[in-house]
Image: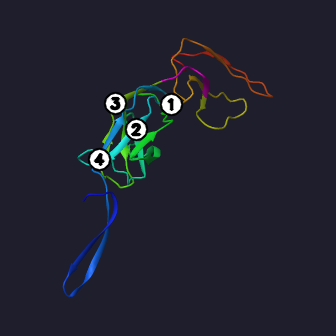
Amino acid sequence: LDHWGKGTLVATSPGVAPLEIGFTVHGSHEAFVTQPSNTVAGRVMTPTVQAVISDDTGALDESFTSLSVGLTGCGASPSANIATVNTVGGVATFDGLKIGPACDSYQLQLNTSYPNWPPPVLSDPFAVTKGPPSQLGLSMARSYVTRRIPFTIVASIEEACGNVIAVAPTSVTLSLAGAALSGTTTQLTSSGV
């Protein structure tokens, strides 16, 4: 076939009604034109990741209107799309792509709206490093406490995406608005916790 997109196949034979079947012609190759690069968690990836779908001669399939990327590595599910963009002239440009959790071995996976067609393609591996410390995280074993019964709160030094940052011992002080909090209210962190 020499064109992209929707088509109709017509079968005829003398003495019987013709049969028409609709179909779609798509490229058979997905590729990253611009590979993802190492980045910092929560920051826009540069250069901008770009991808295409083409045939075996390299001609771009402009009939695809969108492409998606999933994330693999460090427990991520490649079928869960993290970004979907419209294509322009057969090229998908993933402007503003950000990845939060830090990991040293991620890959992006190209996904189309047609399951497993073309077969998914993985990018080159890349790393997402933790950003600078910017916030505190607090967690409790349960969401309630009992009056005059000790309870434990874990505080952590985190970057903007919630990754714990191992910093030099730093003091964290807890206080309770409108009431008294007793016990150990100031503690030094160890490896950011």
Which is more foreground, mark 1 or mark 4? 4
| Foreground tag (2 vs 1) | 2
Q: Whole-percent x and y of residue 130?
A: 49, 23
Marks 3 and 1: CB-CB under 8 Å?
A: no
Disc on res. 125: 3
- In the rendered image, residue 136 lying in the magenta stretch gets the answer yes
Q: Main secondary structure of the magenta part?
A: loop
* Secondary structure state at the residue bearing disc 1: loop
Q: Earlier in the sequence, mark 4 or mark 3?
A: 4
The residue under label 1 is 44
Q: Nearer the viewer, mark 3 or mark 1?
A: 1
Residue 50 image label: 2
Please tell me which residue lies in front, 174 or 102.
102
The Cα atoms of the two marked residues, 2 and 3, are separated by 15 Å
In-image side of 143 versus 98 (left or right): right
The crowd level at tag 1 (other Cα within 10 Å; few <14, some 14-19, many 20+) is some
